[in-house]
Image: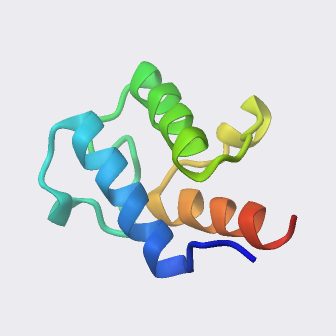
Amino acid sequence: MSQFNKQQILQEVTTIISKKLNIAPERVTPDATLESLGADSLDLVEIIINCEERFNVAISDQDAQHLTDVNSVVNYIDGLLHNS
């Protein structure tokens, strides 16, 4: 059983994204795309790496390409944590 529920995953992902992009956490809403928050391709890679480290999961490059908004990142990590 994972130590993170979906709300906690959202909070952690929000923190990772807001710190990486140097924006207010309030701007990181579940339906916000990473691009709309100002992330470029390098930022996206670093956000994925930070998420992998925080949640102790592996996200394939192929799957990472589909993680375009905050909600997709949260749902993907939730799936990894609760279906393993």
From the viewer's side, name the closer residue of 49 and 37.
Answer: 49
Question: Residue 9: percent from the left, percent from the top?
Answer: 49, 68
Residue at the left extreme of this rendering: 24
Residue 69 vs 71, above or below: the answer is above
Q: Is residue 6 left or right of residue 30?
A: right
Residue 17 vs 80, above or below: the answer is above
Residue at the right extreme of this rendering: 84
Question: Residue 61: percent from the left, percent from the top?
Answer: 73, 30
Quadrant the C terminus occupies: bottom right
Q: Is residue 76 left or right of residue 70?
A: right
Q: Residue at x 66, y 69 (%)?
A: 78
Q: Quadrant of residue 30?
A: bottom left
Question: Residue 7: percent from the left, percent from the top?
Answer: 45, 80
Residue 6 vs 78, above or below: the answer is below
Q: Give the color scheme: rainbow, by chain, secondary structure or one colour.
A: rainbow
Q: Residue at x 55, y 64 (%)?
A: 74
From the viewer's side, name the closer residue of 47 and 29.
Answer: 47
Quadrant the N terminus occupies: bottom right
Q: Residue at x 30, y 54 (%)?
A: 15
Q: How many marks?
A: 0
Q: Is residue 30 left or right of residue 53?
A: left
Question: Residue 54: percent from the left, percent from the top?
Answer: 52, 47
Q: Residue at x 70, y 47 (%)?
A: 57
